[in-house]
Amino acid sequence: DRVLREKFGKDRPVVCKGAKGIMMQREAISQHFPEGKHIVSLDDDIVRLRVKEGPGFDYSTLRDLQPGEFDDICKHFARVMLERNAFIWGCNTSQNPRNMWNHSISVRLGLVNGYWYGYRNRKEQALYPKYGSAAEDIERSLRYFM
């Protein structure tokens, strides 16, 4: 915590001890923060994040995120979530540019993959996945959409 305070000051990330297992860890995070707080979840094994810049179907339309863009994107998604009275956002699950849009945001029911997503915190037990980590992403997507 001292290192984070020295590096980031009052804007330092919040680090707290969690729980064993990804489902219990995500629930502990949700319980730690107040209702309505925007929480971003990012897997610890992600090595690259890319965005689609323009139309087209080949990989030349993709580029790596630049420094600062991760935070900008998360804040943008948080604003859109509030504007549309939504409670969760997620990124495209495909790595294929044929399956990516760069001009719109879908509000249809779909898979919110657990590798990078954000949500407005609600401490309702009915929202927490219950059927095991193999189905967690699907279960969370359905529970937050309804």
Image: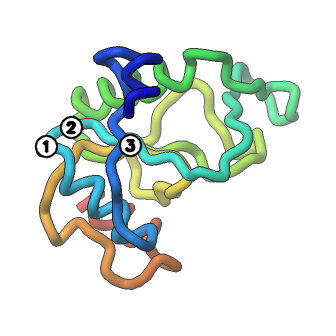
Query: In the depicted view, which residue is nearer to us: 51 or 12?
Result: 12
In this rendering, the answer to whether 117 lies above or below 38 is below
Q: Which residue is mark 1?
A: 34
CB atoms at circles 2 and 3 under 8 Å apart?
A: no
Q: Which residue is mark 2?
A: 37
Residue at x 40% of width, y 50% of height: 108
Between the C-alphas of marks 3 and 1, the distance is 15 Å
- Sequence order check: which comes first, mark 2 or mark 3? 2
What amino acid is at disc 2? Answer: Lys
Between disc 3 and disc 1, the foreground one is 1
Q: Could you tell me residue 100's position as x and y percent?
A: 66, 39
Image quadrant holding the N terminus, namely top left
Between disc 2 and disc 3, the foreground one is 2
Image quadrant holding the C terminus, namely bottom left
Is 135 on the left or on the right of 5, as rendered? right
What amino acid is at disc 3? Answer: Gly
